[in-house]
Image (cartoon, rainbow, N blue to C red):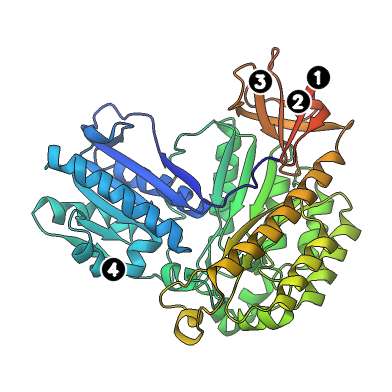
Amino acid sequence: MEKIIDEYKQGESLILEAKENNQRKLFIESYGCAMNFSDSEIVASILANEGFNTTQNLEDADLVLVNTCSIRDKAEQTIRKRLEKYNAVKKINPKMKVGVLGCMAERLKEKFLEEEKIVDLVVGPDAYKDLPNLIAEVEDGRNAVNVILSKEETYADISPIRLNSNGVTAFVSITRGCDNMCTFCVVPFTRGRERSRNPQSILEEVNDLWNKGYKEITLLGQNVDSYLWYGGGLKKDFVKASEIQQATAINFSKLLDLCAQAQPKMRIRFSTSNPQDMSLDVIKTMAKHNNICNYIHLPVQSGSNRILKEMNRQHTREEYFELIDNIKRIIPDCTISHDLIVGFPTETEEDHQDTLSLMEYVKYSFGYMFTYSERPGTLAERKMKDDIPEAVKKRRFNDILQLQQKHSLYRTQQDLGKIVEVLIEKESKKSSAHWSGRNEHNTVVVFPKENYKIGDFVNVKANECTSATLIGEAVGLSNNN
C-alpha cells in the first residue's frame, strides 16, 4: 500500500527568476499548509524590490527566512532542527541574517529571539509589507519583531512571484484568518480574524495567470466557504454594513462562478472548506461549470457528536452526513477527502468507533490523519487535560490509517478501465520516462511520456492502480488544450 498523503510538505527552498541589478541573496524555506507556500511568494515579491534574488545554496545567503507552521508540535520541532542547521552555517558566514516568518513567529513573538539566539527578526503573517523596515533595523544591529495581526491585510495589491513553479498550477489567496475558534486550533491566534480579498483583484490575478500559461488554480484560504466581500473589513462586521453593501456582497459561490466564467478552460480547485459554511449554492456552482474540479476537501475531525462539541465544531455527525448526501446527489462523481484528529481529550472507544463508522459511510478517497497534540494558547490546552495515553492514540491512529488505505484503494479501483483527463504537472518521481499529473478528482496519474509535455491536458486510460495512484497509458490530447 502506498503511504497516505502527509499534510506537511517537506521544507522547500524556493527560486525566482533573478533580477539583473539585485545583488543580495535570499534563501527561503516553507513548511506547513498551502497558505504558507503562497505567503512565501508574497515575501519573495516584496524582497525582490529590495534587491534580493533567491538562491538554493544556503551557504551563499545574505538572508535566510523560514516560513513556519504551528498547527502541530511535530511541525514546530522540524523548524527548530532547521534553525540548528542555520546556526552551523552562520558560524561560517556571520554576516548572514536569519528570520522566522509565519505562525510560529506570531505565536512565540519576542520569546523566539530569546530562545533561538541565531534569530535576527521575527515576522508574523500580517507584517510582511514591513520586511524592508525590519531588515534595515537588523542591518543596524538591532533585532526586529513585527507580529501585529491586521484587520484588513490581504496582500491583494502585491503580485506574487511564482516560486519553484511548474508554470502550470498556482495558488490564489482569497481570504486570510479564521473566526471559527475550534478548541484545538491556533489559526485564529496566529492569523487573526476572517477578512476577504477584493474579488476584482482575484479575477485580475486569475486572468494574468492564464495569460502566462497557467492551466490550473487553487483558490486558497483557511476557510474558503466563508469568503464574503462587501467592500472590505472583517466578516463579523458584515451585519453593520449598509443595505447597499449587503445587497451587492459577493459570497464564495458567486466568486467561484465569476472565476469559472472568466477563464472557462482553466481548471479551478479550492481549499480548505468547513462543513458548517459550505452551502448548497457552492455545490450547485461546481455542478454548473465543467472547469471546476469535482473534488472537495471537507475536514470532519471526528465522527463523534460529543467530541465535535468539545472541539467547538459547529456541525454534527448527522449534518455532515446530510452535506455528503447533497454533494453526492448534485455531483455524483465528486471526490471527498478529510482531516481527522485521533485521541482528542476524553475520547472514548465509543467515540473512536463513531469515527470509524463515519469513514465507512463516506469512504473517502484520501485523508490527512493526526494524533492530537496540545497547542499552547488554545482553549483545549487551557481547559482540557490531554488524557489519552500515547499507546491508545497510536492504536486508534493505526485503525483509521488502515481503514483509509482500504477506502483509498477502493476509490482508485473504481477508475480502472476508464479514460481520465490528466493535467501534466511534472516528471514522475519514480521514473524519468513517465509523466505525473492529477485528474479532476485530485488523484495522481502516471503514464509514459511519449510526445506530451508539461501543461498538456491528456486523456489517459487507467490500467493499474495503488491506493493513491492511477497508472495508465495516454490515448491522446483532450479537447481542453
Residue 93 visible in the shown view = no
Q: Which residue is mark 4?
A: 109
Q: CA gap, disc 3 to disc 2?
A: 13 Å
- Mark nearer the viewer, 2 or 4: 4
User: Viewer-proximal residue, 176 or 35?
Assistant: 35
User: Viewer-proximal residue, 414 or 329?
Assistant: 414
Question: Where is residue 393, by image quadrant?
Answer: bottom right
The answer to whether residue 341 is left or right of residue 86 is: right
Residue 116 visible in the shown view = yes
The answer to whether residue 209 is left or right of residue 188 is: right
Residue lying at 88% horizontally and 32% vertically, measured from the top left:
418
CB of mark 1 within 8 Å of CB of mark 2?
yes
Q: CA gap, disc 1 to disc 2?
A: 6 Å
Residue type beneath disc 1: Gly
User: Viewer-proximal residue, 27 or 225?
Assistant: 27
Q: Which residue is mark 1?
A: 476
Residue 295 at x, y percent in the picture: 75, 50
Residue 449 at x, y percent in the picture: 68, 17
CB of mark 3 within 8 Å of CB of mark 2?
no
Q: Earlier in the sequence, mark 4 or mark 3?
A: 4
Q: Which mark is residue 434?
A: 3
